[in-house]
Amino acid sequence: MNILPLLLYIAAGVAYAIYFARRSPQAGRLATASLAAAALIHTFVVGMRTVEVGQLPFVPLPATISAFVWLLAVAYLYTEVTTDERAMGVFIVPLMVVLQSVSTVSDRVLEPAAVLDSPMFAVHVSSLLFACAAFALACVIGITYVLLFRELKSKQLGFFAERLPSLKVLDTMNGRAVGIGWLFLTAGLVVGAVWLLQLQPNTAADPRVAAMSVFDPKIYVALLSWLVYSFAIYARRAIGWNGKRAAWLSAIGFSIILLNLGPVGYFLTESHNF
Amino acid sequence: MDLLLLGVSHHTAPVDLRERVDFSMRGLSEALRALSECPSPAESVVLTTCNRAEIYVACTDTDTSQRDLARFMSRFHEVPEHELEPHLYTHTGGDVARHLFRVAAGLDSLVVGEPQIFGQVKDAYAVASSEQRTGALLNKLFSWSFAVGKRVRADTGLGEGAVSVSYAAISLARKIFGSLKDLTVLVVGAGEMAELTATHLQSQQVRRIAVTSRTRSRADALARRVDGTAVDWTAIDDELLEADIVVTATGAATPTIGASAIGRVMRARRNRPLFIIDIGLPRDVEPAAGELEQVFLYNIDDLRAIISENLARRQEQTALAEAMISTEVDAFLVWLRSRGTIPTVVALRRRFESVRQSELKRLEAKMNGLPPEARARVEEITRLLVQKLLLTPTERLKTASDDATAAQYAEVITEVFSLEDSPADPPVSAPAAGKRSPSRSTSKSTVAS
């Protein structure tokens, strides 16, 4: 069943590429319909797994990534419907395909460890995943900003100028996505810290819980990403780091997030390997 | 009834002649009324733009109508015939459709793909229609041309990309800022080019236009014309802080705005994007200003380069547009041809109807004993039978692949069913029968309805 959303994400990716290249309205509608179908079936898969394990399917890491892809699809579809702008699909859906492929390779969901049996865990992970989805959108919007910016500066208007919305729209969308992502990232980190402090002594004996400190790679990389995004927000408001600089900052921030979702989460962390 | 077009355009006539035959000088309605005094055209539409003056007519004799129209154009515009004639072009039949479809799609325009022509064709038709100068043929031709014009623009890139300096500047501004409604514009210089661009920006409903010039009175005059505010020349730096778009066209020998001044302003405005359109020659803004991060500096050559690229891109789309038009012309010709076979179709229907009526009359004595419901049923069955028998031959006749085939079919049907011996106006029971007359034109309109 988990393969079906992946196939639909791939179909949507192909349709978005055709839409972007040829600007065919039919391809655009097909792309949105495929992505909506993928998100719907993915919702069903996530729902089934929630019933199966008794709480949101966030462990092991591939299940977390799959939940992230699902949130990203929903967030992107919301953006597309509210802005009536499909041009970014070609950049964001491939990311969903890659991450969902990674998650599908190891297609299993585990009963969460006893230590994770807490509503705060669900809030912690959901907030962080939603923040990641917002940062992914910000990154993609930032990339499209830079592509259009380069065309406008070099005075060689063409491919991207014909297909993308204005620089101002892209910059505003980037700023909003970073702002929303930062709020959820902050909430997720704070809830995680509070949850850790409230753990009972018996569960605190778990070696993974014992490893939870700012020196654990996953935690300090997460804090690093928080610093980057905090700076991005401050710089935009206080020193006029908008446009291209904000775009680069959101790309750097999301690279750090991907580092956490990928190699750090898989191989380096000692605290978050549930 | 055939189609005929006679006209002059930028392809055939110099501008001084085009100006003299411009129908808009005296109005399309007057032209149509004057044209209605010509005996030959049954329907007519007059199209006039700064690049063309054309008369589209439906007539029975194209040679006579062609002479009549040339004479009309010469008399109406008071241009001697010998002077006008070398510049006139005419088309008939399917070529009229092809020409009009190309015109409506913008393929025949001076600037390929320009959008105004589509509205002008629509206006021309609307005036002719309100003057009751159009009939079935021109109604169909023009409504077809509107559909073709729309489709070509939607399915090809023919109308895309700005092809004038002002529109290029506005489309660039839209790519940077999106909507222009909340923007502030600073116009530096009060020359013709500055005014043209400012007028276009004003039509985009920008929030404020500030105008400055070394000569205050010129700034005041331009500000009044573009509904803006005149500001002192010395206030340029302050205005640069507020402006989103700056249009410069001073004609000064040395740059009016230095890169370092813009750098200072950009810091003060916290890197808010600034779009500078420098259309002055020599340039008014130091080129180094364009290297600042959020400064988008375009000079007149940059804008012209964009225009050339857009024109080249439009040119690439013309082959696709021409192919679409050819398909539409073929479809229109099928429809046109089907009109030519209408007399045969009408005669064939009448023939079958007369046979049906005479058979019913012959059997009337035998049917007298039947109840009224049964008699009505017999009437209905026989009518349906005739309709079904005629369906395929009628369709074949209407959709014949070419004129020769259509004529051949018509001849065979006429011969086989002895249609020439048919009564001219047989008693028929169809609801519209009472309105029919033996005249050809009425027959057409009856069938068309």
Image (cartoon, coloured by chain):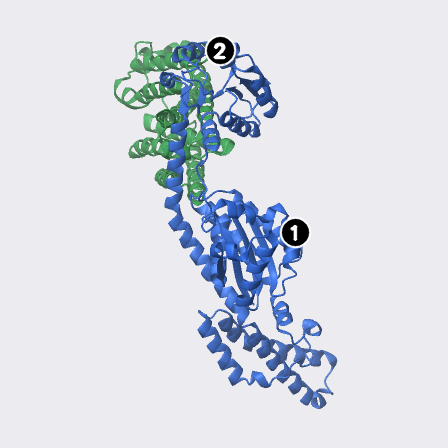
Chain colours: A green, B blue
The chain ID associated with circle 2 is: B
Q: Nearer the viewer, residue B248 or A159?
A: B248
Q: Residue furthest left?
A: A267
Observer-side mark, 2 or 1, equals: 1
**Dot 1 corresponds to which residue?**
B29
- Horizontal and vertical percent for residue A218? 32, 16
- Horizontal and vertical percent for residue A103? 32, 31
Question: How many numbered discs sit on the rendered protein?
Answer: 2
Q: Nearer the viewer, residue B38 or B436?
A: B38
Q: Is residue B420 above or below residue A69?
A: below
Q: Is residue B439 left or right of residue B197?
A: right
Question: Is there a contact, CB below 8 Å, between mark 2 and mark 1?
Answer: no
Q: Is residue A57 visible?
A: no
Mark 1 neighbour class, 10 Å CA radius: few under 14, some 14 to 19, many 20 or more = some
**Dot 2 corresponds to which residue?**
B237
Residue B226's mark? none
Task: State the CA–CA distance, disc 2 to disc 1.
Answer: 54 Å
Q: Is residue A107 visible?
A: yes
Residue type, mark 1 in image: Ser
The chain ID associated with circle 1 is: B
Q: Label 2, secondary structure: give it.
A: helix
- Horizontal and vertical percent for residue B152? 46, 49
Name the image quarter holding the C terminus of chain B.
Answer: bottom right
Q: Label 1, secondary structure: give it.
A: helix
